[in-house]
Image (cartoon, grey):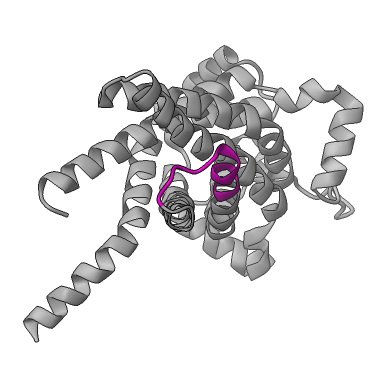
Amino acid sequence: MAEEKKAQAAGVWPKVKPFVNGGASGMLATCVIQPIDMIKVRIQLGQGSAATVTKNMLREEGVGAFYKGLSAGLLRQATYTTARLGSFKMLTNKAIEANDGKPLPLYQKALCGLTAGAIGACVGSPADLALIRMQADATLPAAQRRNYSNAFHALYRIVADEGVLALWKGAGPTVVRAMALNMGMLASYDQSVEFFKDSLGLGEAATVLGASTVSGFFASACSLPFDYVKTQIQKMQPDAEGKYPYSGSLDCTMKTFKSGGPFKFYTGFPVYCVRIAPHVMMTWIFLNQIQKAQKSIGL
């Protein structure tokens, strides 16, 4: 009986391993990058430049403000990154098997990244909504603030006040943004690893660093316009008549384009790139170290 249970556990671990490793690497990266993410959201909400936002936050709210929403950020990684990295690994493994063990062409990697991003976004959308609202709360008038104490309190209040389906408010642009980000992030990383390792002959550390840098850049460039729309949808409040400023993501896109042109969607790009690229890089680096540690102990 003991041997049978051990065999079952051994069979389960390879299947859940990509999901566990993905979630753990994402959560570790979030702990490091949370302050930059907070500044990025404040810039997108019209609070000024990175320097202005940082100075005002320190003066008015203290250092702790930079980690507001950390619980939601960790919950988001535990759901979103667990699902997307785990799904991507499973999808690419299946595709490689179907390709007789040969490396996948870039378009197949991109398709796997798009699919994994959609899966992850659907799973992680509630936590993402809680994170955006907690980060934006201090920018609202005192009477309109929601004052969530943590991610679970935010989720409870959203369900109680607005209904279960409200947890997926803004899920449309969230999914599209995640698909764009993961297409850039996941496909470019795998392709870059092959290039740096096989074509340039770089060692493991240089390959991971170089590939994660390329991955971070493409993730930022592909996803910021969708992230901008998603943020505007998720943080909007009804006016005195109960009317929202945007009827949906397409309406937000059209109004933003008319008022500010295409470059309006890249508001806060330097900070966004500084936030996204390092998070992507650290996620891959942490994932590589976790895998090495597991290999060293036979997992």
Examine the rendered structure and indicate whether residue 188 appears above or below residue 115.
above
Q: Nearer the viewer, residue 135 or 146?
A: 135
48 relative position to 66: left or right: right
Q: Give the residue drawn at x 78%, y 24%.
A: 264
Residue most extreme to the top: 51
Q: Give the residue drawn at x 92%, y 29%.
A: 258
Q: Position of residue 158 (x, y in %)?
A: 61, 61
The segment highlighted magenta reads 101-113
Q: Position of residue 204 (x, y in %)?
A: 26, 27
The rendered magenta stretch, by its main secondary structure, is classed as helix
Examine the rendered structure and indicate whether residue 265 appears above or below residue 91.
above
Q: Position of residue 155 (x, y in %)?
A: 54, 60
Reply yes or no: does residue 52 show up in magenta: no
Residue most extreme to the left: 2
Q: Give the residue drawn at x 65%, y 51%.
A: 175
Reply yes or no: does residue 102 show up in magenta: yes
Q: Quadrant of residue 282?
A: top left
Name the quadrant of the C terminus.
bottom left
